[in-house]
Image (spheres, rainbow, N blue to C red):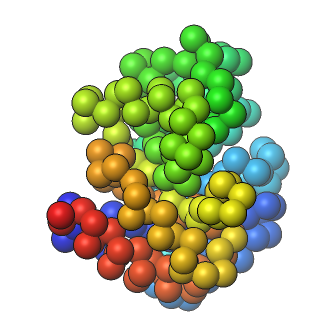
């Protein structure tokens, strides 16, 4: 796996509104990047339509991982899968509780579950029904420090490799034991040295608000760091 980290680790389109996402799309176009991750969890329907329009006119060819949200329709998932070959759609625990997953039943083989770190896992949460986990590595680190129920739910399935499909990768602050979506120092990635190898999937999307140029610099460090870890 370590030999493929350049391809496995993706810079991502993220933003608190559509303008921030479109700015990243433009940056990606200028840099000639063809494959990225996409995070839509903060965008409403209108904002997403603007992003889709810009994506369809962009130079981006592949978006293997998309973090979706509760109000996304089946047609939106079809658009992403057909135009950008999306393999993994990340959902939250709440999407089981509210039965959002039912409208995505045709995509169960593509749905991947991101856990919280709120020390509660409903009995309605059934990773067995879908493709597996999208382990947010910083979330897992928070849970590991707390030894909470979210951590237990993932860790107790460590012997089932098929569940560990993909990842979100952001920073972790050791002082607050919280994930970080804007990073200004490489040291906030060093927690990855403590992560069990079974967590790492075949697609790792950087989940940061930082510009793409900064994400690329982080990626260099991450390829080196994880390359050393995963070859051991």
Give the residue at x 55% y 54%.
138
Q: Quadrant of residue 47?
A: bottom right
What x and y, as percent, mark residue 28?
55, 79
Relative to 65, is 101 on the left or the right?
Answer: right
Vertically, is 7 above or below 221? above
What x and y, as percent, mark residue 175?
69, 63
Give the residue at x 40% y 33%.
155
In this rendered view, identify the residue nearer to me: 69 or 179. 179
Viewer can see residue 68: yes
Relative to 118, is 102 on the left or the right?
Answer: left
Q: Quadrant of residue 33?
A: bottom left
Give the residue at x 51% y 43%.
144
In this rendered view, identify the residue nearer to me: 164 or 141. 141
Give the residue at x 57% y 86%.
213
Vertically, is 130 above or below 88? above
In this rendered view, identify the residue nearer to me: 81 or 28. 28
Quadrant for the N terminus, please: bottom left
Count of labels shown?
0
Vertically, is 54 above or below 89? below
In this rendered view, identify the residue nearer to me: 153 or 82. 153
Relative to 72, is 57 on the left or the right?
Answer: left
Q: Quadrant of residue 127?
A: top left
What x and y, as percent, mark residue 21?
70, 67
Quadrant for the C terminus, please: bottom left
Vertically, is 227 above or below 166? below
Viewer can see residue 54: no
């Amino acid at each position: 796996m370590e030999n493929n980290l350049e391809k496995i680790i993706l810079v991502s389109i993220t933003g608190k509104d559509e303008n921030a996402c479109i700015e990243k799309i433009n940056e990606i176009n200028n840099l000639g990047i063809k494959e990225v991750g996409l995070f839509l969890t903060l965008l409403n329907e209108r904002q997403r339509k603007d992003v889709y329009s810009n994506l369809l006119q962009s130079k981006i060819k592949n978006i293997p991982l998309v973090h979706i949200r509760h109000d996304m329709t089946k047609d939106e998932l079809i658009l992403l899968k057909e135009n950008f070959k999306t393999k993994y759609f990340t959902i939250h625990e709440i999407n089981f509780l509210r039965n959002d997953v039912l409208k995505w039943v045709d995509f169960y083989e593509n749905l991947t579950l991101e856990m919280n770190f709120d020390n509660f896992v409903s009995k309605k949460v059934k990773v067995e029904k879908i493709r597996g986990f999208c382990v947010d590595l910083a979330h897992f680190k928070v849970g590991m420090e707390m030894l909470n129920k979210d951590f237990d739910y993932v860790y107790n399935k460590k012997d089932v490799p098929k569940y560990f499909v993909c990842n979100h990768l952001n920073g972790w602050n050791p002082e607050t034991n919280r994930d970080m979506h804007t990073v200004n120092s490489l040291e906030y990635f060093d927690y990855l040295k403590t992560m069990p190898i079974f967590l790492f999937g075949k697609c790792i999307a950087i989940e940061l608000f930082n510009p793409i140029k900064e994400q690329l610099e982080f990626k260099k460090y991450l390829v080196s760091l994880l390359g050393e870890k995963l070859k051991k």
